[in-house]
Image: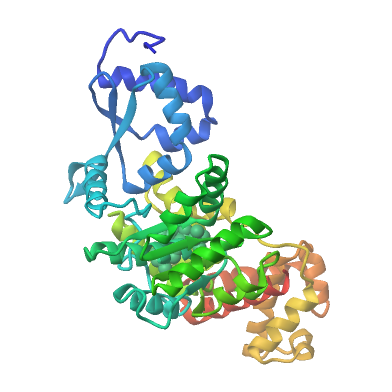
Amino acid sequence: MSRPVPLTDNSPNNAWIEVSEQLQKELPRQSFLTWFKPLKPLAFNGSVLTLIVPSRFYYDWIEGHYRKVLQKAVSKVLGSGARIDYSIDQIDNGHSKVSSITENNKTEGADNNSNRFETHLNQRNQFYNFVEGDCNRFAKAASFALAESPGMTPYNPLMIYGGSGLGKTHLIQAIGNYIVGRKSANRVLYVTSEQFTTSFIEAIKKGKADSFSRLYRSVDVLLLDDVQFFMAKEKTQEEFFHTFNYLHHAGKQLVFSSDRPPRDLEGFDERLVSRLQWGLITELLKPEYETRLAILKHRSEEENVNLPDEVADFLALHITDNVRTLQSALIHLFAQSSLMNRDISINLAKNIVNKLVKRPVTRVSIERIQEITSEELDISCDILLSKSRKKDVVFARQIAMLLCTEFTKSTLKAIGLQFGGRDHATVIHARETINEKIKTDQKISHTVQKLRQRIELASL
Ligand code: ADP
Ligand code: MG
């Protein structure tokens, strides 16, 4: 297909202006401004338009969220064979240096080819960039031990389970990348259960079920992500059951992830559930405060962006649900600060946190918050609501008040009333006092964070 709108001028600038205009028609204004405005055209050779992205984050974000719409715009404006290439703008000692992402990816691809087998692994998921903490230490250690001697440990299969965004895919791919990186002869295959299911159905349709089975039985290490997807898919489960038996019998390594423990997998064949429990089952927990902080620091260092301590602390305190949200907060923060040419500050972070974090409201009562606080701080509820002015009592009361403003929809007046008939100004004062203390006193910020987690659990 030839180019529908002939470009009058083949300069990179012109090509990018035209693609930008097309993109603006397709995207919400804010998305365009945040993600595409900061890009700069570097080169255009008639079919490949190379763009400079401010950081690796940008690249990942654009590829992850806008790949299709961008490709559509490019095809429309520059012709159907045209595509985008990226280079990262790296600031080293104040000097800007551009390095091509695509070149890096090519070498990565070549590595995979030398393994003569398509692993479907994303090279970014490695052990060395998987930040360790109490929440994942055991799972990581088991994964690493297994990666050092696949098929030779008692961890066969290894089953890693945990909520969304807690690092399951990262960890099981790190296993694969580690094994491949050692240039062993092992054939490693990563597949999501969804892909497994789809290709199984396709294979059956095309009468190629045999070659499907053969492919999966030819691997040394099978990494199967999100097994919960097999729920109620009997035929696929059966096929997988046989694959499992075959590989396990042959001493091959199996690794699974799931969003829940095997015993909770509903609509699963009992025999399969029992197989999944043969080896080691390990859970990824929500990252605790220290790990959240470490992840934020790690990612900003990787990105070469200076993240002030108080902003890192603010994010780590407020974003508690998972690593994915934590990272997307960071990406938004970097993007907005570079777009608006503003320093990364708590104020900027606040906006982003407000957008990303939905606090559960109305599901937990003031009384319940009082109970939890009194338990955690070891001060009886009666005393908490009494007239006592003792320091530790006032402190506990103020914390409980703050939490009530965060977790309930009650008015300040109603909250005050339920704290032994105090007025709304007392609640406001409590909220301000504790929020101030959180910023400077790590112990207090810890306590509050722990309470938030308990209340969140109580409100589920
Ligand atoms: P899941 O598969 O459990 O939904 P992912 O493995 O996709 O979660 O993780 C979500 C994001 O968080 C990914 O970008 C991943 O690299 C990152 N991530 C998760 N845990 C960690 C960790 N401990 N250290 C560094 N990055 C992490
Ligand atoms: Mg995943």
Image quarter (top left, top right, bottom left or bottom right) of the C terminus: bottom right
Viewer-proximal residue, 138 or 131? 138
- Horizontal side, residue 403 vs residue 256: left or right: right
- 286 over 30 or under it: above or below: below
Viewer-proximal residue, 28 or 429? 28
Tell me what residue is drawn at x 60 percent, y 56 percent. 236
- The answer to whether residue 316 shows anywhere in this view is yes
Viewer-proximal residue, 202 or 341? 202
Tell me what residue is drawn at x 33 percent, y 68 percent. 127
Residue 45 position in % (x across, y down): 23, 21
Image quarter (top left, top right, bottom left or bottom right) of the N terminus: top left
- Horizontal side, residue 300 vs residue 27: left or right: left
Q: How is the image coloured?
A: rainbow
Viewer-proximal residue, 207 or 15? 207
Residue 441 position in % (x across, y down): 47, 78
- The answer to whether residue 318 shows anywhere in this view is no
Residue 140 position in % (x across, y down): 40, 75
Count of labels in the image: 0
Residue 192 position in % (x across, y down): 50, 55
- Horizontal side, residue 95 vs residue 60: left or right: left
